[in-house]
Image (tube, grey):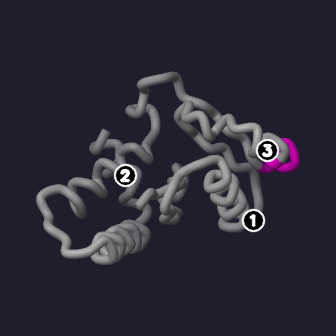
Amino acid sequence: MKLIGTLNYETGDIFCIEEERYDAETFLRFLQLVLERYPTGKIVMILDNDRIHHAKLIQPFLEEHKDRLELVFLPPYSPQLNLIEGLWKWLKSDVIYNVFYSSVQEIKENVQAFIQRINQKPEQTIDRLCIQL
């Protein structure tokens, strides 16, 4: 199971989807969903330099939506500059580490419950994530 997500630095809102694999097609679908999730205004996404973030497949989409969507790439080996890395760390410590699950479905349910809990109090999320990094 692969999670792809965004963290709205302004509101603390988290938007995540689960995928079986993470490739350029998956990333393109995710970008489409992000534009649907946030239908107005400019979106600036902070990303690491994974190959799929630069894939030729997504370039026409980025060009088509350049007025709404901008990708900003972090320098290599700098996860501390991206708050969503704190979210993944928090999720792992609360949901994954030192817990036995009898099925993948049980893991998925607990991950979804974690994200739902966080989104109930998004104003507290940014502060907590800064501590996680």
Q: Are marks 3 and 1 in contact (CB under 8 Å)?
A: no
Q: Judging from the image, what secondary structure is the residue with disc 3 in?
A: helix
Q: In terms of depth relative to the viewer, which is nearer, 58 or 128?
A: 58
Q: In terms of depth relative to the viewer, which is nearer, 73 or 44?
A: 73
The N terminus lies in quadrant: bottom left
The C terminus lies in quadrant: top left
The amino acid on which the numbered mark 2 sits, given as a three-letter code, is Leu
Q: What residue is disc 1 on?
A: 39
The amino acid on which the numbered mark 1 sits, given as a three-letter code, is Pro
Q: Is residue 93 above or below residue 33?
A: above
Q: Are marks 1 and 2 in contact (CB under 8 Å)?
A: no
Alpha carbon distance from label 1 to label 2 = 24 Å
As for residue 66 lying within the magenta part, the answer is yes
Q: Residues within 10 Å of mark 2 (few under 14, many from 20)?
A: many
Q: Residue at x 79, y 44 (%)?
A: 62
| Magenta segment | 61-68
Q: Judging from the image, what secondary structure is the residue with disc 2 in?
A: helix
Q: Nearer the viewer, mark 3 or mark 2?
A: 3
Asked whether residue 99 is in view, the answer is: yes
Residue 87, numbered label: 2
Q: Residue at x 36, y 51 (%)?
A: 88
